[in-house]
Image (cartoon, rainbow, N blue to C red):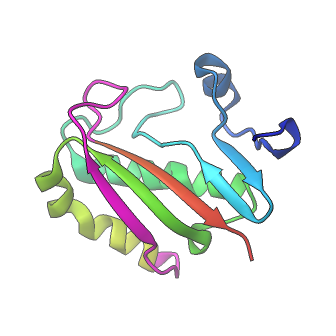
Amino acid sequence: MARLENVITVFLNLEERFGLSYSVKAGKTIYLSGLLSVDDDFKLVGENDMEAQIRCIYKRLQFVLTKCGADLRHVVSEINFITNSPALSDASWVRGKIYKDAGAAIPAVTGVGVASLYLAGAMLETHATAVLD
């Protein structure tokens, strides 16, 4: 159960608009909502460009983690929802480089193929779980 004191507000306007919390901390575990490749106005970034969408998502992920007192080294698990698996396979090196550049191990990951995501044109949504030291 999420208690108000466990919610870490990150993008207040989007959280209020969509009725969600981007992050909830329970003990040392941080649960993050799925992140799409969007700008601060929730407009798609990188239409039909998986590399651009990965870069945007992980930039947002790093921002959210920082707000929670964490970074990519704390991410232990991801679930990636994918509309185009071949495009993700071709661009997966970007994700690996982001983790490597952060000095982090690549976390456990599950990929789930889906027909579409919440935002038209989105090819990837990433849900991460992090654990603080």
User: Image quadrant of residue 6?
Assistant: top right
133 relative position to 112: left or right: right
Q: Residue furthest front?
A: 1
Residue positioned 60% across, 25% down in the render: 14
39 relative position to 88: left or right: right
User: Image quadrant of residue 26?
Assistant: bottom right
Residue positioned 76% across, 40% down in the render: 2
Q: Reply yes or no: does residue 79 show up in magenta.
A: no
Quadrant of image for the N terminus: top right
Quadrant of image for the C terminus: bottom right
Can you give x and y, in whole percent of width and height, for residue 102 in the image?
A: 52, 75
Q: Identify the magenta region.
A: 101-123
Q: Vertically, is 119 above or below 23?
A: above
Q: Vertically, is 76 above or below 58?
A: below
Can you give x and y, in whole percent of width and height, for residue 97 in the image?
A: 36, 73
Q: Residue furthest right?
A: 5
Nearer-the-camera pick, 112 or 54:
112
Residue positioned 69% across, 65% down in the render: 70
User: Image quadrant of residue 132?
Assistant: bottom right
Can you give x and y, in whole percent of width and height, for residue 72 in the image?
A: 56, 68
